[in-house]
């Protein structure tokens, strides 16, 4: 496995390092933002909800735009560098904000950068490796991403324990931001074949094979049951888990995903993408069933959340590799735009529906619905989406 990882092109390694430093900075800010708004800017939960809602919605919509433009310009590097630069600049400026609307504008800029870079970056990864290396490449990238998601909160906790003010901690995000942009600038644009016909965007997905369109529909069904991960942490807290252990529980998820993303995604190169994704979605369904039915066994939360990390490791890389398997090379950016838009756009209705089921009925009802969506999506992916991998 190590030999295969070290044989990956330099572009894959550079993009992995870029994601590590960027996510370390991003996940350093994320847990501090509620504290910063409440204790420094005196803003309440409504402001936080508006900020995160606007930010995430913007990022989802722009992922399609960034992918389409990368295909039309036949270039991905400009969008990758620009997107990471915008995020690197906006994060430390939050420390200088005097009111929550300024934080809203800066989070909007941060997520705009993410939206513009995500699909071109995924296309760059797919174009940089051979088809038999796609699972390994995307798995390695997700492992580096999750490593940053572990490092960021731990670094934030250490800084807080040293008595460092939140504003000063936020300013320190400038350092990994500069490293991120410097690494992104050193990446070479991958070679692309010239398209046979002039590329034209179509809301009907003209130019894409039926298998890809079916994949998006099945992904939408799965995502309808894949609400915000905040509900998982809320469930753990409602079961009686001490508050100081909640961040550690989520760090366990990221750590598990970091360890297993590369080997599990690489397994999809040999066993096939569909098999691995179906298995991961079934693990997801089982996790939600057990978490919904578990009432008081706090000790069970730790192996369950580690189990959830395995789901992430098995699916995050393989799902993106499957996009490259099904989509035409000349439309890879657009394909990843549709993939990211489908997953992102469904997050809001999924979370609203999950919250309504929880509050109107029982937590077990909400978790059972999510598990049902995952298992139905797994069956459709296996028997309806006739993927080549």
Image (cartoon, helix red, strand yellow):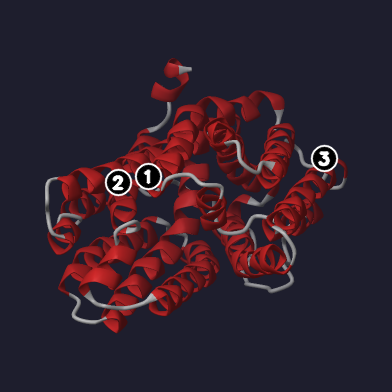
* Front in this rendered view, residue 62 or 46: 46
The number of callouts visible is 3
Q: Position of residue 43 (x, y in %)?
A: 31, 78
Give the labeled residue for mark 2. Answer: 152
Q: Position of residue 306 (x, y in %)?
A: 53, 33
Q: Position of residue 280 (x, y in %)?
A: 67, 37
Mark 1 touches mark 2? (CB < 8 Å): yes
Residue 187 visible to an observer of this rendering: no
Horizontal side, residue 73 vs residue 332: left or right = left
- Taking the spot 40% from the left edge, 37% from the top edge, the residue there is 12
Mark positioned earlier in the residue sequence (3 or 2): 2
Q: Is residue 263 above or below residue 287?
A: above
CA neighbours of label 1 inside 10 A, class few (<14), some (14 to 19), many (20+): many
Mark positioned earlier in the residue sequence (1 or 3): 1
Mark 1 touches mark 3? (CB < 8 Å): no
Give the labeled residue for mark 1. Answer: 149
Q: Position of residue 343 (x, y in %)?
A: 61, 59
Q: Which of the two discs, 1 and 3, sits closer to the camera?
A: 1
Considering the numbered disc 1 on the image, is that residue within a helix, a strand or a loop? helix
Q: Whole-Å distance between the Cαs marked 1 and 3?
A: 31 Å
Q: Whole-Å distance between the Cαs marked 3 and 2?
A: 37 Å
Q: Find residue 382 and name its label.
A: 3
């Amino acid at each position: 496995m190590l030999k295969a990882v070290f044989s990956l092109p330099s572009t894959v390694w550079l993009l992995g390092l870029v994601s590590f430093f960027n996510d370390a900075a991003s996940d350093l800010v994320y847990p501090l933002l509620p504290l910063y708004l409440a204790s420094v800017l005196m803003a309440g939960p409504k402001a936080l909800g508006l900020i995160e809602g606007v930010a995430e919605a913007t990022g989802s919509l722009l992922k399609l735009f960034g992918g389409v433009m990368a295909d039309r310009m036949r270039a991905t590097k400009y969008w990758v560098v620009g997107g990471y630069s915008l995020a690197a600049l906006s994060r430390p400026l939050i420390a200088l904000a005097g009111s929550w609307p300024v934080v809203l504008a800066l989070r909007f800029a941060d997520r705009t950068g993410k939206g513009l870079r995500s699909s071109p970056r995924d296309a760059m990864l797919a174009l940089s490796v051979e088809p038999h290396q796609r699972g390994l490449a995307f798995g390695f990238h997700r492992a580096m991403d999750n490593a940053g998601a572990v490092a960021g909160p731990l670094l934030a906790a250490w800084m807080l324990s040293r008595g460092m003010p939140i504003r000063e901690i936020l300013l320190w995000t400038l350092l990994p931001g500069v490293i991120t942009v410097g690494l992104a600038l050193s990446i070479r644009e991958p070679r692309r074949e010239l398209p046979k016909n002039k590329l034209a965007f179509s809301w009907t997905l003209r130019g894409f094979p039926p298998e890809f369109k079916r994949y998006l529909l099945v992904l939408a069904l799965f995502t309808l049951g894949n609400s915000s991960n905040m509900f998982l942490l809320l469930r753990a807290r409602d079961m009686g888990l001490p508050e100081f252990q909640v961040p550690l529980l989520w760090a366990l998820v990221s750590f598990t995903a970091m360890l297993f993303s590369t080997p599990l995604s690489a397994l999809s190169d040999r066993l096939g993408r569909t098999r691995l994704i179906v298995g991961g979605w079934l693990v997801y369904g089982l996790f939600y069933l057990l978490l919904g039915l578990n009432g008081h066994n706090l000790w069970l939360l730790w192996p369950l959340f580690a189990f959830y990390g395995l789901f992430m490791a098995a699916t995050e890389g393989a799902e993106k590799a499957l996009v490259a398997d099904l989509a035409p090379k000349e439309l890879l950016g657009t394909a990843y735009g549709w993939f990211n838009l489908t997953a992102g756009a469904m997050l809001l209705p999924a979370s609203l529906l999950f919250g309504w089921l929880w509050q109107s009925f029982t937590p077990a009802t909400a978790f059972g619905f999510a598990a049902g969506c995952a298992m139905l999506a797994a069956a459709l992916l296996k028997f309806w989406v006739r993927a080549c991998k």
